[in-house]
Amino acid sequence: MANRPLQLTLNGQPVGPVDIPDDLPMIDYLHEYKNLTGSRLGCGQGICHACVVIVDNPDGTSEEVRTCITGAHYFEGKQVRTIEGHAKRDESGQVTELNPIQQRFVDEFAFQCSYCAPGFVNAATVLVEKLQRQPTVHSKLEQVIEDSLGHHVCRCTGYVRYYNATRNVLTDLGLVKEG
Amino acid sequence: MKLFLTRLALAAGLAAPVLFAHADDQAKRGEYLARAADCMACHTAPGGAPFAGGLPIVSPFGTIYGTNITPSKEHGIGLYSDDEFFAALTEGKRRDGAYLYPAMPYTSYHLMPREDSDAIHAYLKSIEPIERAAPVTSLSFPFNVRLGLMGWNVLYGKALKLEPAEGKSEAWKRGQYMVEVLGHCGECHTPRGLPGAMELDKRLTGGILNGYLAPSLLATDLAARGWNEQDLATFLKHGMSAQGTMFNEMFPVFHNSTQGLSDTDLAAMATFLLGDKPPAAKALVEVPVDKLGPSALRGRQEYLNVCAGCHAAGGEGKPHIAVAMRGNTTLRLEDPRNLVRVIEDGIGEQKFSGFEHMQPMPGFAGKLSPAQLTDLINYLRQGWGGQSAELAVSDVQKLQAEAPSIEHKAH
Ligand code: FES
Ligand code: FES
């Protein structure tokens, strides 16, 4: 396989152009070239969603993309966020503040082994940001959470605490209106 | 005498009428025939009781519902005599004299011998009656006028003529009965003219169903796509072979029908389809990367970006996850329609025989631009489909416009 140049924005930082193989999966690029090992390789087949990153589209929307089944060059020119990009850090790179989803998942013991957690954090973060653009209503809240998190697999928790914690964050942030 | 009768039937290319001592045996034989005739497919709603009807069949004329064919006297066929059942099966005539809509493939079944109809009837009488009415078909005018079907029937109802069986092997004759009559494969794999009737001079040359191509089953076309007898029989038995997996409308056919047929019958079907002297399966000619056209070369990177994770960079696929692209029958079709549809719609998770299954394929509708989709399709066809011509973006857009993407939930 030949190399070709890749340029993208990763957690707000411009990266590249860097020559990498044309068939390199994104998860391998993150792990092996960028030392960003927080995105988890679970099934490697596009099912569990442990490996998702967030792509921010030019129109202001965001989406999850599975990095195990997507080549690094798919992300050419795109704005990408990984699990490492959510928390606030100080000059030395130490985490000073988690994002509201991360903090709530910790506070409410939402995960156990945590293998699936980066995927859930990204999914719930995309949901928070979506509702910040267009809030939902109480009567739809559970379905909205199911629709946003339901494709993520967790083998430990039974999902309930993940979903409850997400509901609590959304409610506390004022993203759920009457109705 | 029995031997004589058997020979006579075989000579006529029909199922051997073994003289059954018990009604049980007749019902058992009927169960197998009903499976081969795939009655289940239309007469069972998804998740519904077997043969209790309710499957909506979308036709150009409106939605037709499969009827309840359990022995319920009120809602099913409990009051049918063998004669009446035979008339419904082979002439499309209901017990009350009304005509059935030709979604019921009586144009194919009308060549079914009486003893096979009786056996299927015996089987259906032996199953549990389901006391529930199937939804009522209501078509728009003029198709709601069942009387009009009389004219349709005069024109087309009996138009199916089988290819003469003289000089053919016994396997070919049996295969012809399984494919043409019981399996009614021609109902989908034949183009339909405006009144919804099969264009019989183009029989088995391929038809279009809900935006997908039911490809040509002619021997030369099958061989051109790399099929041989053994692979065809394997495909029918297991729903998968080196050429790929069953999907879309063929997936339930595999589940309800072909996987439960005997190896002898499946081999006979392959013999009939490819002929007693089958044409050699065409070897695949792959276009090497440095010979790819400009669109296909761009498409190669699209493939590496969004397909190779499951179908592998070299197109060999991954066992139990995703089929091989190299030599895949959909890539080898000259018509790119199914490739467009599958990439746009995706395929739900599929379970095959034993523990075998394939993981769901995501649909890419709205995720690839028409130009990206065209590049990808050109790469797939040139790289692993033996189709060297490059399609234009407008060719692909035309196919996209013909059948808007649907989201697949199951299979
Ligand atoms: S590792 Fe990517 S979906 Fe499971
Ligand atoms: S916490 Fe262990 S897999 Fe989800």
Image (spheres, rainbow, N blue to C red):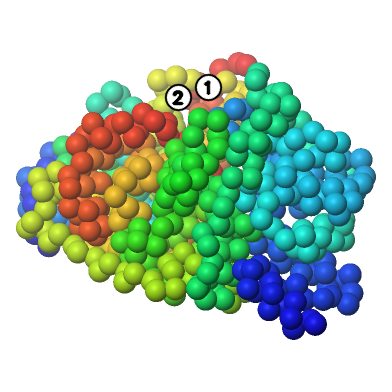
* Camera-side residue of B404 and B200: B200
Q: Is residue B290 above or below residue B196?
A: below
Residue type indicated by callout 2: Leu
Q: Position of residue B106 (x, y in %)?
A: 67, 47
Q: Position of residue A112 (x, y in %)?
A: 51, 56
Residue type indicated by callout 1: Thr
* Camera-side residue of B278 and B236: B278
Give me the residue at 46% from left, 52% from top.
B204
Give me the residue at 56% from left, 52% from top.
B161
Q: What mark, if any, has residue A131 been given in the picture?
A: 2
> In which image quadrant can residue B253 be found?
bottom right
* Camera-side residue of B389 and A25: B389
Q: Secondary structure at mark 1?
A: strand
- CB under 8 Å between discs 1 and 2: yes
Q: Chain of mark 1?
A: A
Decide if residue B253 is on the left or right side of residue B334. right
Q: Chain of mark 2?
A: A
Mark 2: few/some/many CA within 10 Å (<14, 14-19, 20+) = some
Decide if residue B322 is on the left or right side of residue B390. right
Q: Is residue B23 above or below residue A169?
A: below
Q: Position of residue A40 (x, y in %)?
A: 36, 56
Q: Give how far apart the Cα atoms at labels 1 and 2 are.
A: 6 Å
Q: Secondary structure at mark 2?
A: helix
| Residue located farthest toward the top when viewing the structure as drawn | A178
The reply to whether the residue tagged 1 has its Cβ within 8 angstroms of ligand 2 is no
Quadrant position of the C terminus of chain A in the picture? top right
Mark 1: few/some/many CA within 10 Å (<14, 14-19, 20+) = some
User: Label 1, on which residue?
Assistant: A136
